[in-house]
Amino acid sequence: MTRKGYASELRAKEELIKEFGSDNVIKVAIGGAQDFIIVQKGKLLKVVEVKECHQKKYYPQPREKGQRVRMIAFCLEHGASLEIWIRYPQRQEWSKEVVLL
């Protein structure tokens, strides 16, 4: 049994590698917040959080709201942009929300 959202994370990783290259995409497995960080030329460029939703609209849980607060603080401290990618099963494309630029 795979954990919830794992397939979406793999799809997101493939898309990020196509765009930024495999050396620049790092999977973050600790902290309980961001899923991927993108590094280019020694600088933190972007933080990507991947969510999977089985309803028609994404409603974050209280834990996910706390994650978002921690991610925003992390991105502000390091000068990176924050994107939240949401995968709906009925759609082929990602719903991408840019939180910070």
Image: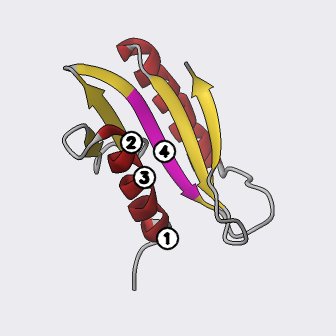
x 36%, y 43%: residue: 36
Residue extent of the magenta highlight: 46-51
| SS under mark 2 | helix
Q: Is residue 50 left or right of residue 15?
A: right
Could you tell me the amino acid type at mark 4? Glu
Check disc 2 and report the residue beneath it: 19
Could you tell me the amino acid type at mark 3? Glu
Locate the C terminus by quadrant: top right
Check disc 4 and report the residue beneath it: 49
Q: Position of residue 96 (x, y in %)?
A: 63, 43
Locate the N terminus by quadrant: bottom left
- Real-space CA distance between mark 1 and mark 4, rounded to the nearest whole angstrom: 14 Å
Determine the image quadrant of residue 39. top left
- Real-space CA distance between mark 3 and mark 4, rounded to the nearest whole angstrom: 13 Å
Magenta-drawn stretch contains 48? yes
Mark 1 residue crowding within 10 angstroms, few (<14) / some (14–19) / many (20+): few
Mark 4 residue crowding within 10 angstroms, few (<14) / some (14–19) / many (20+): many
Mark 2 vs mark 1, foreground winner is 2
Mark 4 vs mark 2, foreground winner is 2
Mark 3 residue crowding within 10 angstroms, few (<14) / some (14–19) / many (20+): few
Check disc 1 and report the residue beneath it: 4
